[in-house]
Amino acid sequence: MSTPRYRILAVDDERNILKLVSATLKKQGYAVDTALSAEEAIERFNTSTYDLVLSDLKLPGRSGIELLDYLRSREPNLPVIMMTAFGTIENAVEAMKKGAFNYLTKPVNADELLSVAKEAIEKYDLRRENLSLKSELREKYAFSNIIGKSAVMQEVFDTISMVARSQSSVLITGESGTGKELVARAIHFNSERSEQPFHTIDCTSIPADIMESELFGHEKGAFTGAHERKIGLLEHANRGSVFFDEIGDLDIGLQKKLLRFLQEREIRRLGGKERISLDVRIISATNRDLEQEVKAKQFREDLYYRLNVVTLQIPPLRERKDDIPLLAQYFVEKLNRIEGKNIKGFEDNVLEAFAMYHWPGNVRELENTVERAYVLCPNVNINMKYLPPGLLALVESDRVESDTLNLLETEARLITKALNESGWNQSKAAEVLGITRKQLRTKMKNHNLLPG
């Protein structure tokens, strides 16, 4: 027989009632412990974990209300159902005001008992899942999970920490693939709003004629096809945060309406008359130069200044090369957890290639590159064989160019040294270098070393 998933504590000073309640619940697969007093119930509560407590209101010693107070002080979300005789229903109602989930009248009806118990446990389960999910989200978007030891990223972390504690609008700028949404989520989940909703709006993917309804909602009949009321994303995010990804692509007409919301902190659904006050923090991001967009009349200046209370610039990957090995290793370990393989890391020449490459797609491109190599690699360490051909070609081109520059720099230093040692006598310098005077003059010309 499988182990019962849920455990219930039943408390009553009448043994027959406990036997009846216990038998009814056990038939439905619940594990049931019993207690004859509040003191015994407290002792069991402190040594076991329960998903529901059923308690009589009248108990010897401490009352059922006192037991309820004790349980809620230790586990505020644990559902407690009170059992009471018909003549003391007022006391049961008072218990609900103090936080009891519900009450049952004696003699307890088996169907009603099972129905109320099931409802209480399901709601408790859902709440625990929500709390667990929120805890996971806070952990996932903790500052420590934004990988970077470079000086520029340490400055970013410091700014995120300060910004998270404020209520100000934030504009995150940076190239595509630098992790702007990750930073936006870190700001939200490290703020006082972390328990409230976080919604993302991709301004590049939603057509302008749909975007207004998505943002502000609409009433039934507001337009053809509006068969019922729709609550918009801003309203859904009340007391939380909304992240506008690529805000520079927002339709110019909607920019005006977003500005009005930022000024008044109110919305009106399409087709509606009621003005709805909202408390929503706006975080936005763009890979465009919004100042230039303002000058070109493509973005409203007044909206730009409303959004740009605090600016957070995310550096491209090519400017934080010290972070590349850390990020690459992080992606490998993440894939190991998902795929179950045991790739240790990278051969040295792979990391050298990563350092030489310019990463136009930034962190997103690095993650995709690592995933491709991971999938193809049967070895303990990823080697050059599994890197994309385009990346290898560009790295090789850069290496050849770098080698050529190094040779030219070395040649210029040798010629300058020979000239200095010969008092700039070109014939003697050519003899030292083992070349003709004509060859020397050609090289001096190429290196801008000929006297003016």
Image: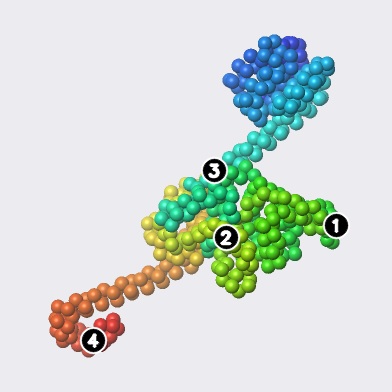
Whether pointer 1 and pointer 3 mark residues with C-beta atoms closer than 8 Å, the reply is: no
Q: Which one is earlier in the sequence, the residue at label 2 or at label 4?
A: 2
The residue labelled by disc 3 is 139
Q: Mark 3: which amino acid?
A: Glu
If the image is split into quadrants, where does the C terminus sit? bottom left
**Residue 37 shows up from this direction:** yes
Label 2 secondary element: loop
Q: Is residue 249 above or below residue 267?
A: below
Classify 10 Å Cα crowding around label 2: few (below 14), some (14-19), many (20 and above): some
Q: Nearer the viewer, mark 2 or mark 4?
A: 2
Q: Cα distance, mark 1 to mark 2?
A: 36 Å
Q: Which residue is mark 2?
A: 308
Where residue 221 is drawn, which disc sits there?
1
Q: Along the line of sight, which residue is nearer the eye, 186 or 160?
A: 160
Residue that badge 4 annotates:
451
Amino acid, disc 2: Asn
Q: Residue furthest bottom?
A: 438
N-terminal-most mark, 4 or 1: 1
